[in-house]
Structures are given as structure tokens and as C-alpha cells.
Amino acid sequence: MTKEELALDVITRLKKEYPDAGCTLDYDNAWKLLVSVRLAAQCTDARVNVVVEDLYAKYPDVNALAEASPEEIEEIVRPCGLGKSKARDINACMKILRDEYNGKVPEDFQALLKLPGVGRKSANLIMGDVFGKPAIVTDTHCIRLVNRIGLVDQIKEPKKVEMALWKLIPPEEGSDFCHRLVYHGRDVCTARTKPFCNKCCLADICQKNGV
Ligand code: SF4
């Protein structure tokens, strides 16, 4: 089986296994996803979803977060860890949205990359989830799983994994495929325990099964 064929098979099986997989960060507005992805660095999505409730209760829109001081934002986001830098980035980011984009999130990958604290992973997530554009989100689950399955060969650097996957995954499938990898990585192909290959829907096509 070629890597392209393997990719299509994995996509089909994960779709069946996790039909409704989506982003596990809660948001009802693009700028809120921008805030949440910054807070999610080295923090669980579940914790971020709780912390942002307090944040938005006090600062309900882009203007309010742009006008707040980084210290005031840090007071609330501290439970997510790295509070100082996350607060600084969120404040700077909201100022740019307010001043340069009329309070909106730009629908442009390169423009997103220029925002403070936004890397390729976050920019891809926003392109895929908010704008419905092709996206490959190479988070820790994605990188671990595509290496184990054999879609890439010992590539750990996120951008290189992303570039390799662009060649294998049909563009319109990328965003949902990556969400499904997160679900599968949490439930079955786990990082901290031995993966549960005996109950994995990819067992007969995965190169790491049982190894
Ligand atoms: S067979 Fe095992 S290593 Fe391969 S994807 Fe499934 S759980 Fe992960």
C-alpha cells in the first residue's frame, strides 16, 4: 500500500470511528478561538474552556481585551500556565485586530502568522475551523500518530510533518482528519501509556501495531 492509499484508508476509518469530531476548544466567534489557541499552549483544552468564561465575563469583546492591560489579563489566565506571555500576546493580538482589521480575524494564513503568539498550528486551526479552508494542524497527537501509523517516517518537526501531510491528505479532508487524530490520540493511541492497539480501528494497517 502506498502512503497515499494508506492515508485515504486511515481517513475513511477515522471518519467512521469519530463521525462528529471537531475542535475541542469552545468558541462562538473567530477572535475567541484566537484567544483560546494561545491559552491552549501547554494546557488542556478543558481548562482553557473554563478559564475563558471568566475572561469573557470581564472582557467581552476585542476592544475590551485590547484596552485591558496585560497584567489584568494575566490575573485571569494564570491557571493556563505561562500567564505573562500569553496575556501579553492576547492583548497585543487584540490591539492589532482592533487597529488593522476592524475587529475581525483576517482570513489569510500569512496575516494570521504575523499576529503575536500565532504559529503555523494555530493559523491552520483557524483557517480550517473558522473559514472552512484546507488546513493541517500538526499538534502533538497528530505528529505522534502519523509517525506510528507510517504516514511519515520519523519526522518530528511540526512544519515538516505538515508539509509531508499536505502531499498525502486531500485538502478538504485535512482539518477534520487532524481533529480525529486528536480524539484517537486521547482515547486509543495514547502517549503516556502503551497504545491500545488491540482495540484500534487502524490495527491491521498501522506499521507500529504491537511494536
Ligand atoms: S495500531 Fe496501535 S500504534 Fe497504530 S494507530 Fe492504533 S493504537 Fe496507535
Image (tube, rainbow, N blue to C red):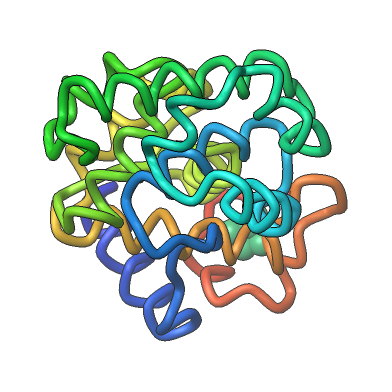
Q: Say if residue 199 shows up in the picture.
A: yes
Q: Nearer the viewer, residue 15 or 30?
A: 30
The residue drawn where x is 83% and y is 38% is: 79
Considering depth in this image, is 183 or 153 the residue closer to the camera?
Answer: 183
Task: Please indicate whether residue 18 sits to the left or right of residue 114 in the image.
Answer: right
Q: Quadrant of residue 50?
A: bottom right
Can the viewer see residue 209?
A: no
**Left or right, residue 64 beside residue 110:** right
Picture coordinates of residue 98 (x, y %)? 26, 28
Seen in the image, is 26 located left or right of residue 49?
Answer: left
Give 71 or 2, whichever is nearer the viewer. Answer: 71
Residue 82 percent across, percent down from the top left: 74, 21
Q: Residue at horizontal 22%, vertical 61%?
A: 173
Residue 158 screen position, x and y as percent: 45, 24
Is residue 204 placed above or below 168 in the rendered structure?
below
Residue for point 21% across, 41% down: 104
Which quadrant holds the N terminus? bottom left
Q: Quadrant of ligand 1?
A: bottom right
